[in-house]
Structure formats: structure tokens, C-alpha cells
Amino acid sequence: MKLRLNTILIAIVLVVLVFFLYAEKRGTYLNGSELQVFLLLVVTLFSLVVNSKLKNELFEILNLVFVAFYICRIPFVFIDGISSYVTQRGVDISLIPWDIFILAYQYFILSICIIAINPKIPRLHFDNGISEFVFVRILSYAFFIIVVNIIMIALSFDLRVQTLSHVPAILKTIFTIELSIMVIILSSFMVEKKTLLKYKFFVLTCVLLAIGCITYQGGKSFVLSIILLMYFAYLVLYGPMAFRLRGLIITMGVGLTALGMYFVGAVFRMYQVGGGPMKSLSEFGFYFNKLFIEKDNLQGLITAISHRMGYLDFYIEKVSNPVYQPYVSFTYYFKALLDKVTPGFDVFGVPFMSRAIYSAFHGEGLVTNSEFVTVFGESYLLLGFFSFCLFIPLLLLIKYVLLRFRTSSGIASALISMYVVYMFYWWLTGMGLDMLVAFIMYVGIFIFSTVSLILYWSRKEKFNSSEEIIVPMN
């Protein structure tokens, strides 16, 4: 018996609905927004029920993101001691009912667009799998990228400053550790089980090196990113997620590990930002004690985790605060994107929108930071009620790429589909269309470089096989 992820999401929404029905709203920013919250929950249930029949992969990702980061935030609003951007940044509470109505509308419109266009992943050409010959070369390729990244970080990493020149920085942005792990995960899903078991320790070594490197840099959610990449690989190869009991228990266990690594990454981030030029183990111990021993800071980190999933708060604060509106425009996006693609110089000297809105509220800091505007906040600020004018072209483009971009290699075709899924999820995180376009270009270079190598290795394997078949005549 299997339990579908869609069913789990429906159960979560029903639990939140019952909780909100009986919860005391006074003293929270949702007081006076009861009807709008119920509307939001009903729209969410509608989307989940429809996709239980439609079984669209992108629709499942949208619903997962919305339930996890918007709906699941609602109970945290009622917990004492858990602060919110909505209350911290002086949002006009009287505007929140309208903001939530707009959120329900934007989510509903995007859902309707997905239902109408129905971009699905074709899997017929994934059946030929992957040979050991190609799998070994993929592992070596990914391992090489991970090692080069580790060397570059060991020689030049400083979280507070830009230490690489322009070209190495671009190469490091394109050939990343996370994308290397994505290729390893997808190929591991497609190779025969006996081949995977043969190279399991090498795969594990790559994953552990990647986790260690990202955590050292202060990354707090890389284990969660690995879980997400595994989910995407499953979605691409098999369709909407379904759990057996054993798989569900393992996923929950790995999720708890990801939470623990979030704390470890937070320690390293404090250490990297606050440590001197000659960092020592004693300084690391100081930050470990500061985070885990001092109660106030531990409580603050728990609050930070709740904020991380607080897209509902991000959305309300971004659409309500006029300080952000000058940066959420197609004109600003063009300037920021042009600066990022010009080699070695800037034309306008402006950062990505997500970084600009952080500085607009906080001012410049020691470390480059960004803030989520959310996909629904961005679409409303850009196009208002006509956000479908953005959703429809994007979904049509996604459908075209999924249907037309195929190769003779199953792993190469699957990698292109995973690229599309990964970019769709990245768009839903709401870091801005300008950063999305740049990310599509950078990740696209990596993906199509990798696909070219896979096709070359596949042709080489076929050529070697044909030579072995030929028997010379005496």
C-alpha cells in the first residue's frame, strides 16, 4: 500500500483548517481575516483534489510549496514568542484581509493556468536507462567539479568579501556542487541496482564532501536540498510522489537530520562572519556555545526556522510595504540582469531585486543577503489581477521544452526534464524574475554541457561495442 504525497498535503490542510476554526484569533495579525483565510484554505483543497485526478508533476510542486510555506505558517502565527515580519515591520493590519484575498486569487489563477495548459513530463524515452560505462564517467565528472570547488573555497573563501576574479566566479556559479549532486542523484536513480551498489561508497563520498563543503561555508539547508533533489528525480522518472511506510519513516528521519544540519550550518555561518582573518577552533567553540548553550539564541534560531517557512509573512509584508515597489519592475529587472551578464563590468551598478529589497529595509551589511518577494507577491506587484499574462507564457514555454527537447540518451533527456522542474521550483521560491533568468542561463550552461558529455560518452560506448563485435576475416 502506498500513500500519495497529495493525500498527505490534503490531510495537512484539513488539520490547519480545523485548527484555525477553533483557535483564538485575538492578538494575531489574522484577526479580522477569518473569511479570507478560509477562502485560502478552500482554494488550496480545490487544487489538491483536482491534482489527485490530474496527476500533474508541476501542479504537485506548486501545491507542495504552497502548503509547506504558506499554509503551514498559519499555526505559527498563534505561538507566543514567534515573531513575524508582518508585526515587526509595521504592516497596516487593516490591509491584511485584502492581501490574503489577493494571495488566494493569485494561487487560484496559477492553478487554473496549470490545469488548462497541463505541462507534463514525457517518460517514454527514459526507458533505456544508463550503462555502467556512462555512470562511471558521470560520477568522475561530478567528483571533479566537487573537488575543484573545494580547492577554490579552501584557497580563497571569505563570506564577507568577493575573493574570486570575474571569470572564476562565473565558472563557480555555473559548475556548482549542488548541480553536481543533482546529476549524481538522477543517474543513481536510473542505473541498475547492482551497478549502484558497486559504486555506493564513491557516491556516498561525493555526497559527504558536498555536505561538508557547503556547511563549512555557512550553508544551513543543503541536506534539505539533497532531499528536494531526490524528490525531483523521483517526480521526473516516476510521476507524483507516493510513499511506502518504510520510505515515509526514512524520509522523516532524514528530515530530522536536515534540521540538525541547519543548526550546524548556523554555527559555521556565525563563525565565518564573526571570526577574524586567522580563525581558530577556540573561536568556533565560542560560536557553538553561543548558539547551542545560550537559551535566548537557541530560541532565536527556532524563530528563524519558522521564518524560513514563513512565505505567508514574506508575501504580506512585501505587497504592503511601499519601500519595495521601485525594485519590483521589469525596468529594474532589465538593469540588474544586464549588469550580471556583462563580462567584467557593470552598466547600471544595481544588484538583483531580491538583494536590493533587503538593502532597502536593512541597509548595506557585511554579508550579501537577499529576501523573498514570493512568486505571488511579485506577480501582483508587476501585473496586478492580470498575472495570468505572465503565468501562461511561462507554462507554454515549459510545455514546449518538455515535449521538444529529447535526445537519444535516456539520462540526458531525463536531465533536461529535471532542469525544467528545478527551474520551475526555483521560480516558485520567489527570488525574482531577474535572478531567475540569470539562473536559467547559468544552470542551462551546466546542463547542456553535461548533456553533451553524456551523449559523447554514449556514442563512444556504442563505437567501442561495435568494434568488439567485428571479427576480422582470415
Image (cartoon, rainbow, N blue to C red):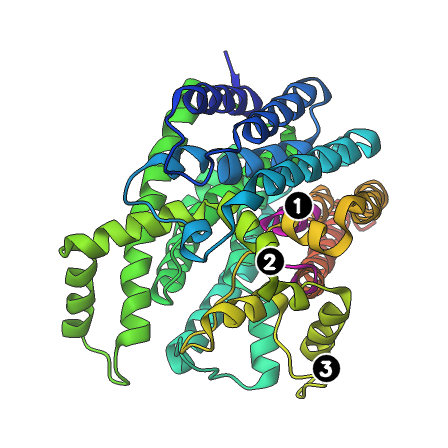
Please give the residue where the numbered disc 1 appears in the rendered image: 418
Amino acid type at circle 2 is Met
The answer to whether residue 190 is seen in the rendering is: no
Amino acid type at circle 3 is Thr
Picture residue at 40% right of the left edge, 75% below the top: 159
Point out the tag, 2 or 3, that comes first from the N-terminus. Answer: 3
Please give the residue where the numbered disc 2 appears in the rendered image: 431
> Could you classify mark 2 by the number of other residues whose Cα lies within 10 Å: few (under 14), some (14-19), or many (20 or more)?
many
**63 or 184: nearer the viewer:** 63
What range is drawn magenta here? 419-435
> Could you classify mark 1 by the number of other residues whose Cα lies within 10 Å: few (under 14), some (14-19), or many (20 or more)?
many
Magenta region, mostly helix, strand or loop? helix
Q: Is residue 47 magenta?
A: no
Percent across and percent down for residue 357 are 56, 67
Q: CA distance from mark 3 to mark 1?
A: 28 Å
Residue 296 vs 362, above or below: the answer is: above
Residue 401 marker = none
Point out the tag, 3 or 1, that comes first from the N-terminus. Answer: 3
Residue 455 vs 62, above or below: the answer is: below
Left or right position of 470 against 234: right
Left or right position of 330 against 248: right
